[in-house]
Amino acid sequence: MQRFNFEQERQLVRLQRELMDGSYRPGGFRSHWITRPKPRMISAAPYRDRVVHHALMNVLEPILERHFHPHSYACRKDKGTHAAADRLQELMGRHRYALQCDIRKFFPSIDHEILKAAFRRLIKDQAVLTLMDMIVDHSNAQEPVAEWFDGDDLFAPAARRRGLPIGNLTSQWLANWMLDGLDHHVTSAMGFGAYVRYCDERGIHLTQVGTTACGRTILLGRGGVRAADDRVVAGGGRRRCLLHEAVEQQAA
């Protein structure tokens, strides 16, 4: 960083020239592991690459902001952890039941092809897309995650690249965009309006179960379905549950 800033103007002009003529290539990461609140690998890109990330987000942020769900709170101006907590407290005061969901190993699980398809639905400038592809493709190796879905064969988890480095500014924003469709699906298609998400954790709140929720199959987080007094209604060991079944267990 000091070396870059010591000759800042020359370095910025060099970066600009590389970006314009297509010769820019990202450097290697420095990585370390943290253990709290859970083990995860944090990766730091070279300083000059971080300058590029910020320049890219100066272009993308106003575009993405117009499309983000209003109750997605990570990495956004006038949002953040305090605003998410305020929203959560508001919902807890109005609703009896809450479902907390977490995506297991979210950043290591992000599929590069699906992510690229997601931002191509919104971004049309080829130069910007080329840079975004390069940043995603240059992601360092992440913690291996093996998940199978309907139609997958034995080798499907290894067939495509997955994972974004925790620590990149671009990773936080692209991961947020990756889940934006889920936000709108939960609140619009499934009808759960009392909703809040911060990165890969989300909460859904219900006063009672009616025709909107009955029969909807929803992902169950590790914390389970919790009532307002924090008693576990349905434990997190099951992958899927029907919300009305969980509430019937609470009533019993």
Image (tube, rainbow, N blue to C red):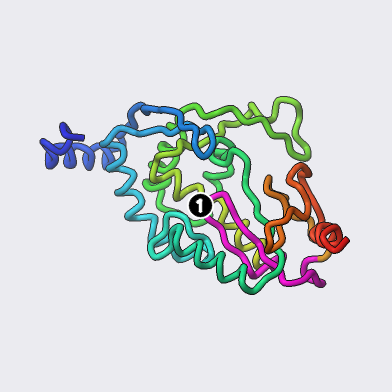
Residue 140 to residue 82: above or below: above
161 on left or right of 74: right
Most foreground residue, 145 or 22: 145
223 on left or right of 84: right
> Residue 203: which quarter of the image?
bottom right
Residue 245 to residue 51: above or below: below
Residue 131 in picture, x, y percent from top left:
38, 42
Residue 23 seen from this side: no
Most foreground residue, 99 or 124: 99
Residue 249 to residue 103: above or below: below
Instruction: Kindly identify the residue that appears in the image at 58 percent across and 43 percent down.
Output: 114
SS at mark 1?
A: helix
Residue sticking out furthest to the right:
252
In reply to whether residue 194 is colored magenta, the answer given is yes
Residue 51 in picture, x, y percent from top left:
27, 43
The amino acid type, in three-letter code, at marker 1 is Asn
Most foreground residue, 85 or 54: 85
User: In the image, which residues are magenta?
Assistant: 189-213
